[in-house]
Image (cartoon, helix red, strand yellow):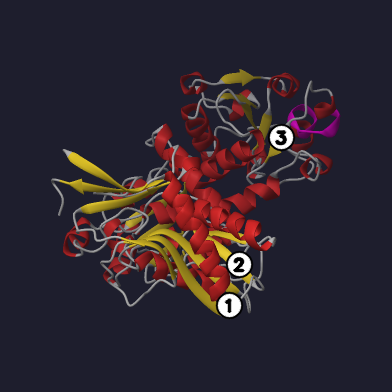
Amino acid sequence: MSSALGKDLLGLEPLTAAQIKLVLDTAGPFKEISERAIKKVPTLRGSTIVNLFFEASTRTRISFEFAEKRLSADPVNVASSGSSVQKGETLVDTARNLEAMRIDMVVIRHGASGAAQFLADRIESKVVNAGDGTHEHPTQGLLDLLTLRDHFGRLDGLRVCICGDVLHSRVARSNIWGLRKMGAEVGVCGPRSLLPNAIDAFGVTVFDHIEDAIQWADALNVLRLQLERMQAGYIPSLREYNRVFGVSRERLERAPKDILILHPGPMNRGVEIDSDVADGPHSVILDQVTNGVAVRMAVLYLLAGGRPDLAEAAKGGEGRGVGA
Amino acid sequence: MASTSDTVLDARSVARTLRRMADEIVELNEGTDNLILVGIQRRGVQLAARLASGIQQRENVEVPQGALDITLYRDDLQTVGPRPVVGPTHLPWSIDGKVVVIVDDVLYTGRTVRAALDELADFGRPARIALAVLVDRGGRELPIQPDVVGRTVEAQKGQRVDVLVEELDGRDAVVITAREDGA
């Protein structure tokens, strides 16, 4: 028996709607733990989790570390700079060496799409994808789903538009997979140069004008515009991007209803999103950060444990289910 | 999988038993001062609410209630694996210096109570923790004993003892089910 989610969490594409719902339902009670005076439960006591970050990350790494510590696991942080990775060690060798020190789980952030899968296929430890190239960032997708569900009470039938650099965004991909599986309608809006060629294959509605997206949507998930995209020639200038695609208060005021604003961070204020929107009454950007810890606790919990060999040995223990 | 069920307590006897337990809790505490009832998710929560309303009727005092979900404090995550977290832990009052009565439906191995004691310790330091259960079915695996018991039943290892409550199950009852394929 593997866990309810399987051995690893590599993306939202391989998950069923029921599995996604299980994570969201499990995250609810985990939120309460972060409100306690002692923000810790003993659930993963004795588990060692390695946070293997080959790309810069503040929010995601700290969020995972909080989640691990609040479940009483022992986190070890490995960053590519200052480690043997800099000396040219391969990903698999790094992970195998860590595994030889007896670890239980690896949380990996890597610049190459498919790196998490590649690792999961080669080591016994459970692998959680914390972002791989432009492929997926499943825990970000899950925390966006949780934030939307908390606010609207449902995901089914909800209209969510993902705005900005969809082409390079793993957050966009995880959102599209997760939202569509949960019955939401997904739109994307951005310059055609920053949308994948095969965007139609994702089953989304494409908006060329942010005004049209705002007319349509219940919520906007505004992606970070990587500043280096300008140098690469995807957009003429940041100022022009803001003028054509920026989410501003003036634009939102013309919407038929209040629109919920999400952003995975870090924000470029004045580029993809204006400050009075990011800090405005309909922004749930900080709720996303709070929910991120709860969702990651839920994922770690659901992947943990469940050793059938040990269960067999312990049989004759508790006879009943949750009660007794 | 054939199975036969025996009703140990029907709705009226459950009500009568809970009334008596409410009185015993007040006696144990010599009054209602500093008393907090904490139900274990799930059915302990409903039973705690009944006990609180019983105390309210007799003593005219509203006793604070809380709820504890002990799933994250279980000792079998490594073996059995994660189980759905069934409900939130909700302890809006400080438990420091209070008399906390843990309320659960069935006392069996004692492992749930062990987990509940650990969880309570993370919320504070009560003056006393007591245990009230509707049914004690024996079969303890830990040195844990109840302070207030509704009914003691002799149940074999392969049997299930279930407490049903109106709010979740549509009726109040205590039922023993013999599993013919039981352990």
**What is the spatial separation of the Cα atoms under label 2 and label 1, in whole angstroms?**
10 Å
- Discs 2, 1 touching: Cβ within 8 Å: yes
Identify residue for label 2: B36
- Quadrant position of the C terminus of chain A in the picture: bottom left
Q: Which mark is residue A63?
A: none
- Dot 3, crowdedness within 10 Å: few (<14), some or many (≥20)? many
Taking depth in this image into account, of A227 and A204 the one nearest to the observer is: A204
The residue lying at 76 percent from left, 33 percent from top is A247
The residue lying at 61 percent from left, 23 percent from top is A192
Q: Amino acid at mark 2?
A: Ile
Query: Magenta part mainly helix, strand or loop?
Result: helix
The mark lying in front, picked from 2 and 1, is 2
Taking depth in this image into account, of A285 and A212 the one nearest to the observer is: A285
Highlighted range, magenta: A242-250
Q: Which mark is residue B126?
A: 1
Identify residue for label 3: A260
**What is the spatial separation of the Cα atoms under label 3 and label 2, in whole angstroms?**
41 Å
- Residue A205: percent from the left, percent from the top? 58, 19
Residue A248 is a magenta residue: yes
Q: Amino acid at mark 1?
A: Pro
Q: Is residue B98 above or below residue A1?
A: below
Q: Amino acid at mark 3?
A: Leu
Residue A304 is a magenta residue: no
- Dot 1, crowdedness within 10 Å: few (<14), some or many (≥20)? some
The mark lying in front, picked from 3 and 2, is 2
Chain letter for mark 3? A
**Residue A315 as seen in the image, left or right of residue A291:** left
The mark lying in front, picked from 3 and 1, is 1
